[in-house]
Image: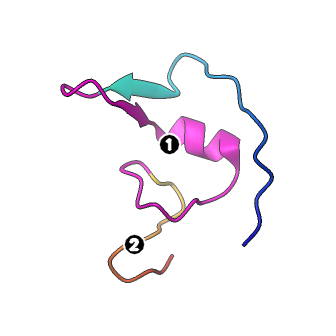
């Protein structure tokens, strides 16, 4: 699968910081990006399951 890697400006609500200090992208951000990266993201709106490698 080939994706264009255009940079999406971050806006309020696109991510939050976890207690460990990591940036966690929200469903809002993933929908703006427009595709599933198949990384098993915590808030994936595309229904990807990393364990079964399916959507």
Q: Nearer the viewer, residue 19 or 44?
A: 19
Identify the residue shown where x is 68% and y is 40%: 32
Residue 45 covered by magenta stretch: no
Identify the residue shown where x is 60% and y is 18%: 11
The residue under label 1 is 27
Question: Whole-percent x and y of residue 31?
Answer: 63, 45
How crowded is the residue under tag 1: few (<14 C-alpha within 10 Å), some, or many (20+)? some
Vertically, is 47 above or below 43?
below
Task: In the displayed orientation, state which residue is furthest to the top.
Answer: 12
Mark identifier at residue 43: none
Badge 1 element: helix
The residue under label 2 is 49
How crowded is the residue under tag 2: few (<14 C-alpha within 10 Å), some, or many (20+)? some
**First in residue order: circle 2 vs circle 1:** 1
**Display colour scheme:** rainbow
Vertically, is 20 above or below 27?
above
Disc 2 versus disc 1: distance between alpha carbons? 15 Å
Q: Is residue 7 left or right of residue 41?
A: right
Tell how many labels: 2
Q: Nearer the viewer, mark 2 or mark 1?
A: 2
Residue stretch in magenta: 18-43
Q: Are marks 2 and 1 in contact (CB under 8 Å)?
A: no
Identify the residue shown where x is 51% and y is 55%: 45
Residue 24 covered by magenta stretch: yes
Question: Whole-percent x and y of residue 10?
Answer: 62, 22
Q: Is residue 19 left or right of residue 17?
A: left
Question: Where's the N terminus, which quadrant?
Answer: bottom right
Question: Whole-percent x and y of residue 51?
Answer: 32, 77
- The overriding secondary structure of the stretch rendered in magenta is loop
Badge 2 element: loop
Identify the residue shown where x is 47% and y is 66%: 47
Task: In the displayed orientation, state which residue is furthest to the left.
Answer: 19
């Amino acid at each position: 699968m080939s994706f264009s890697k255009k940079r999406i400006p971050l806006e309020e609500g696109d991510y939050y910081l976890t207690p460990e200090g990591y940036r966690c992208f929200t469903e809002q951000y993933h929908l703006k990006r427009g595709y599933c990266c198949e990384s098993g993201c915590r808030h994936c709106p595309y229904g990807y399951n990393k364990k079964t490698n399916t959507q």
